[in-house]
Amino acid sequence: MCGELRRAQAGQRATLMGWVNRRRDLGSLIFIDLRDRSGWTQVVFDKESNPALHERASDLRSEYVIAVTGRVHQRDGDTINPNIPTGEIELICEEMRLLNDAKTPPFLPSETDLPNEEFRLQYRYIDLRRPEMQHNIEMRHKVALAIRQHLASKGFFEIETPFMTRSTPEGARDYLVPSRVHAGAFYALPQSPQLFKQILMISGFDKYFQIVRCFRDEDLRADRQPEFTQIDLEMSFPTQERVFEVVEGFLKAAWKAAGVEIATPFPRMTYDEAMRAYGSDKPDLRLPPMTDVSSAFPPEALAQLNVDPKLPIVAIRTLKVGELSRKERDDLKPLLPANRGAKLFEDLKRLEKTWPDAVAKIREFTGAQPDDLVVVVAGGTAPTPHPSEGGVKPEVKQHDRAVYTAAGALRIALAQKFAAKHNAFAGERNNASSYQFLWVTDFPMFEWDDDEKRWAAAHHPFTSPHERDMDKLESDPGAVRALAYDVVLNGTELGSGSIRIHRQDIQARIFRALGMSDEEARSRFGFFLDALQYGTPPHGGIALGLDRIAMILAGGDSLRDVIPFPKTAAAKDLMVDAPTPVSDAQLRDLSIAIRKK
Ligand code: ASP
């Protein structure tokens, strides 16, 4: 193949087939860089030795597809190109066949100055010819293969589940497929195979996995796609630790496929610990944690500073920022999310004038060096009362959470603003220490939905609460912790899962706690509630985003870099131009009328 000829083959005859990446015409010599997915080789057409062939080569244009046969020639010292693997040789062409010509492409795969992404997505077949994209797709293939092989070696079966199914409750809108045979009825594309994989456990397939497409009709953000790929798995009789071990095993295999040896097991942290130390349920461990500095302030200081002593007070330390001007300090203020009742003290020197002991303690507690930036976030305004917030609890409650998450967002914003100074995000791609993995465990079972004014499942309603919290299901839902876990990498969530409820009576109780009547639960999940009654083993599992993993390992910045045919942020496929209206006849078949807006 074009990228594989080496010096050792000098003198041998070789045949290559590929695309004309570039043609340079130096009069008596024409050079073609011939490209295929393995790379490219320089092919030489010499007028003196073969004038007819040279003449034909002068007609070649970019992206023509040709086959060439010739002799591998060791390049002279000064023409060696050390930047490419085939740079020490060239192929002296003796025969050439034109396999296909090409229209002038809208842009060239060899261009470094790329046109805008929409244009590239429209001509995705050209875009995919670019070496970066070829590399990304190859990486994705290798990673998926390594994961499959690892899981198969551990006794997992890959089992397919349907795409045309009924709505699954992952919290997003479904994509619907109208049924022609059953007018007015719809299939839903799965948001995940959640219920099928649980049913597979009931069916006795005690280790299931699937690299599977999922569909969610959400408002798209930069890092979302309406269809995306999960590494989905489920096991019977597992402990949480057992699930972690399996996931760590296949992630290790995936990273190894990309040439990086990561260490396992990953550290573990509960949700409450993560909230207190990082103000986030997906902590970025490349940055220092926050420090609880509430004990640094005497009560009169808090009163004078208008700080609520019952809410968290944390210090954020950003490394190596150095001295900031007044204006630079003022610019930090808007980085604190405004709507969570949190306030920022960004000028410790000013605070020090009135409260020198408090500031000395803050410096001591955080272990800050002189060139580190330390700011303090506290709860300022009195929070609105919340039905389940009474008493002092070990759990992070909703009010505390508001202050913690505001501080956590500020922590990340500061780190991004000063990234060039502390370099924490600049880890080498092939260095294991650039990848800070972590398990976050014991998530809250419920989240308060402020719009709907009710508790909603924080993960999904099939997640098992902790046995010890069962008595709080009705009395204090906010305090209930679940056997739910996320695997986090460098501040992004790679995947989430849980130990499931395997008893029908508990499942019914959870639906009730979510404000679902028995009738509603039956109408939505009747088949599943029935199945649970026929000898369901304890089970649990997880799903991880393959697109994100491939993106990280390929060094891409967007999921679109590792999805061959992705959608835009407006959920469009620009190459095939989808979605599109369909004919009246098709609509009639489906008994569908389009309502004019
Ligand atoms: N189905 C869940 C999801 O897609 C993952 C799991 O609980 O296994 O997020």
Image: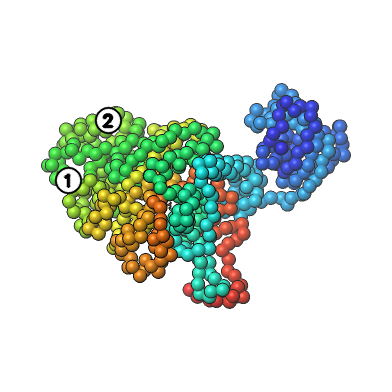
Mark 1 residue type: Pro
Q: Please give the name of the residue rendered at 54% of the width and 55% of the height, measured from the top-left corner.
A: 160
From the viewer's perspective, is 65 left or right of 453? right
Q: Position of residue 193 (x, y in %)?
A: 48, 56
Q: Position of residue 129 (x, y in %)?
A: 65, 45
Q: Position of residue 96 (x, y in %)?
A: 82, 41
Reading the image, the residue beneath label 1 is 309
Q: Could you say which disc has been placed on residue 367 in the image? A: 2
Whether residues under marks 1 and 2 lie with C-beta atoms below 8 angstroms apart, the answer is no
From the viewer's perspective, is 578 left or right of 372? right
Q: Could you say which disc has been placed on residue 389 in the image? A: none
Q: Please give the name of the residue rendered at 50% of the width and 72% of the height, measured from the top-left corner.
A: 185
Q: Is residue 145 visible?
A: yes
Q: Is mark 1 within 8 Å of ligand 1?
A: no
Asked where in the image residue 318 lies, by quadrant, the reply is: top left
> In the picture shown, does residue 531 fall above or below 83?
below
SS under mark 2: loop
> In the picture shown, does residue 505 fall above or below 13?
below
Q: Is residue 337 visible?
A: no
Q: Please give the name of the residue rendered at 62% of the width and 52% of the height, measured from the top-left corner.
A: 124
Asked where in the image residue 576 lies, by quadrant, the reply is: bottom right
Q: Position of residue 400 (x, y in %)?
A: 25, 48
Q: How is the image coloured?
A: rainbow
SS under mark 1: loop
Compute the Cα span from label 1 to label 2.
Answer: 23 Å
Q: Residue most toward the left?
A: 300
Q: Residues within 10 Å of mark 2 (few under 14, many from 20)?
A: few
Q: Work out whether mark 1 precedes mark 2 in sequence or the reverse, and give the earlier one.
A: 1
Mark 2 residue type: Gly
Q: Please give the name of the residue rendered at 17% of the width and 51% of the height, measured from the top-left corner.
A: 391
Q: Residues within 10 Å of mark 1 (few under 14, many from 20)?
A: some
